[in-house]
Amino acid sequence: MGKPTEKHGKQGFKAYTLATIVLLATILFGADWALVWRNASAERGTGDAHHAAQSKFLEQGLYNITCAARDRVFEGCSVHRGTHCARVVIDDFISEDEAASLIRLAETAFNMISNGGAGPVSVFDTASGATSRERGFIDVFAVAKRIRSDIEKLEAELSTFPPANNPDTTAAYETKQNKLTALKSRLFRPEDVRVKLEVEARFKSVAERIFGISSTHLTKPSFIARIKSDIPALQTNDEYWYRHVDTDQYGTFEHTAVLYLNSQEGNYKGGEFEFLDERPQEGHKGELLVVPKRGRMLLFTSGSENPHRVRKVQSISTTQGGVRYAWVLALTCDETSRVPQGQVQRLLDSAYPPLPHSL
């Protein structure tokens, strides 16, 4: 990978649907791709009542845009003026089962430390282990390590337990065995960890091919976010609906992906991803929205060409709340900002049974 140069400026693969195969082939082999737009004629439950008339929804496709300037450029990896910046929507990027595994992975992390944050947003950073707890964060991998230690102690005790020659001994053995089973159930399932690693590798490969780059690295934060409706924000981290740019927010991001793990329809209202163009693209002056749909991946360059926000998640009805799950992943060109192998190993060790470090 080349060294950065200074630039002046401000700023287990699921089978694709036929449409997705056509899309990827079009991108990879250089033909023009027409973005499919669908005009909105009603609010469609976005949670922001003002948007109906001027909204457009970004469907599966590729949308090229002009790159903003970058302060640093890694040759063969970074985007900059004159290179390829875009917004890409790919449906069915992951299967229903993979989405369920990733939700279970996040919920296991939350439950390991008392069910996540006290506000509307709970996050599990799959790279560092930082996980919401009440109004702060805790390292769930460290919690898992303590649970593993307790498991090993109980297993040692049970291996030398006296024979079941009386009711009291039998009852004590069963009590310890039940405790052991409960402790094991608190750790990550190996199959869920494998799905997480496989989807990350898939994302990296597809992003590199779409943008014609190489030498990228997975970076952090890389978090699964659970957003619940009708819970007031208790701290700054809960106010997820404000405009931001990923390179400003996270520093190391070069390409960002949002992978939707459940659909808006039937689960919540609102929660759309909204691009906030300061200079309207292709003459469009209204709002540009991406509707969450299970298995859908939104991929975009992380610079100021793509300012965005997430609309507020709202309940389905007065009697049914709403919950939105999405995983934010990113690539960096800076090798020093990659996810360290040691952090990956901590995740592997947090499963039961633990996974080999060779994965």
Image: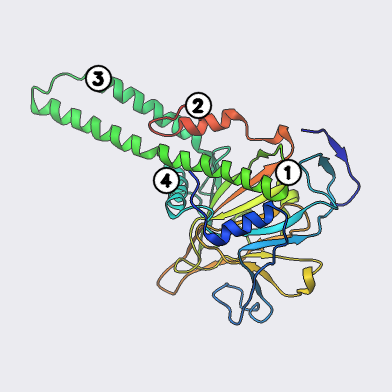
Give the crowd class for mark 3: few <14, some 14-19, many >=20 residues within 10 Å. few
Could you tell which of marks 4 and 1 lies nearer the N-terminus?
4
Q: Residue furthest left?
A: 166
Q: Amino acid at mark 2?
A: His
Q: Position of residue 144 (x, y in %)?
A: 44, 33
Could you tell which of marks 1 and 3 lies nearer the N-terminus?
3
| Residue indicated by mark 1 | 213
Front-lying residue, 237 or 1: 1
Callout 2: helix, strand or loop?
A: loop
In three-dimensional space, the C-alpha distance between marks 4 and 1, rounded to whole angstroms, equals 39 Å
Callout 3: helix, strand or loop?
A: helix
Name the mark on residue 159. 3
Asked if one can make out residue 198 in the rendered structure from this viewpoint, the answer is yes
Q: Position of residue 337 (x, y in %)?
A: 70, 35
Mark in the foreground, 1 or 3: 1
In three-dimensional space, the C-alpha distance between marks 1 and 2, rounded to whole angstroms, equals 28 Å
Asked if one can make out residue 233 in the rendered structure from this viewpoint, the answer is no
Q: Position of residue 287 (x, y in %)?
A: 69, 72
| Residue indicated by mark 4 | 111
Quadrant of res 217: top right
Q: Amino acid at mark 3?
A: Ser
Please say if 193 is above or below 151: below
Mark in the foreground, 4 or 3: 3
